[in-house]
Amino acid sequence: MTESVVETTTGAILFDRQIINEISEARFQAAGWLHAEPVGGALRASGRGNTMYVGNVPRQFVLRHYVRGGLIGKIVHDAYVWAGEDRTRPFAEWRLLAKMADSGLRVPRPAAARYRRHGVVYTADIITVRIPDVEPLSGYIRRGPCTEEFWQSLGEAVRAFHARGVFHADMNAYNLQIDKDGDLWMLDFDRGKLLPPGLWQQKTLSRLHRSLHKIATLDPQHHFRQQNWEQFLEGYFKASRSA
């Protein structure tokens, strides 16, 4: 991966020349591409309406504008406090994704990221390579009951991330994506980190459990039962013991 940084009139752009050999501010707007479409359907749940597919097949990208969630998002839509370039959310996520992709973990490969500074705050965007033929775990389990082997393999895959010290700040049934082979990919590593083993591992598992339980409660068409979670944990801890 070739990391390059170019300054702009309001901030900077970080990009990989092997993926995008020329970059400009226009690429961080839908109008800067010949083709752009909003991410729709269940995938939208993980992006809060701030995500676009851009570019043409076979090389498409995902353009995401950083917006705040939770209670603070009702007051401040997309501004973050400036604390230095390396600590901006897009640059931190870009570099984390690059490390994980280079190590063989199933994550989107980062293409470009930018921040635009406005005094003591900044706004931000990131572009990643689109992963073909994936759907959120929430959609995957709505199409029908999954096998015990699937849930165990899902647990093993999540453990592989934890074994590398990958902390996902919002591991839920939307940010976990399943490809056509049934393999796990993780998306949206805003505020993600590399950490030593600790209680954060159990906390992220609990976050995923709550997410699965919630969607199954709201819509019984989602095929998730407590038995499936026990199968997931069986795969997770089996991978832990064999590491």
Image (cartoon, rainbow, N blue to C red):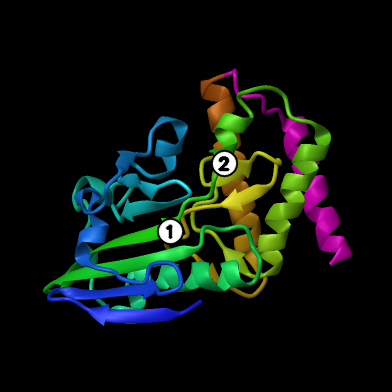
C-alpha span from label 1 to label 2: 14 Å
Decide which of tag 1 and tag 2 comes sooner along the chain. 1
Q: Nearer the viewer, residue 168 or 57?
A: 57
Q: Relative to residue 206, is residue 39 depicted above or below?
A: above
Is 145 positioned to the left or the right of 168 in the image?
right
User: Is 92 displayed left or right of 179 in the figure?
Assistant: left
Label 1: element kind: strand
Residue shown at the point (54%, 29%) measured from the top left: 215
Q: Secondary structure at mark 2?
A: strand
**Is residue 84 in view?**
no
Kindly tell me whether residue 173 is visible in this rendering. Answer: yes
- Which residue does the image show at 51% across and 52% down from the upper left? 187
Between 198 and 208, the one lying in front of the other is 208
Residue that protrudes farthest toward the right in the picture: 242
Q: Quadrant of residue 86?
A: bottom left
Q: Is residue 193 magenta?
A: no
Query: Label 1: which residue?
Result: 128
Q: Position of residue 112 (x, y in %)?
A: 36, 67
Lateral position of residue 213 relative to residue 91, left or right: right
- Tell me the kind of residue under disc 2: Val
The magenta segment: 220-243
Picture layout, residue 103 above or below residue 52? below
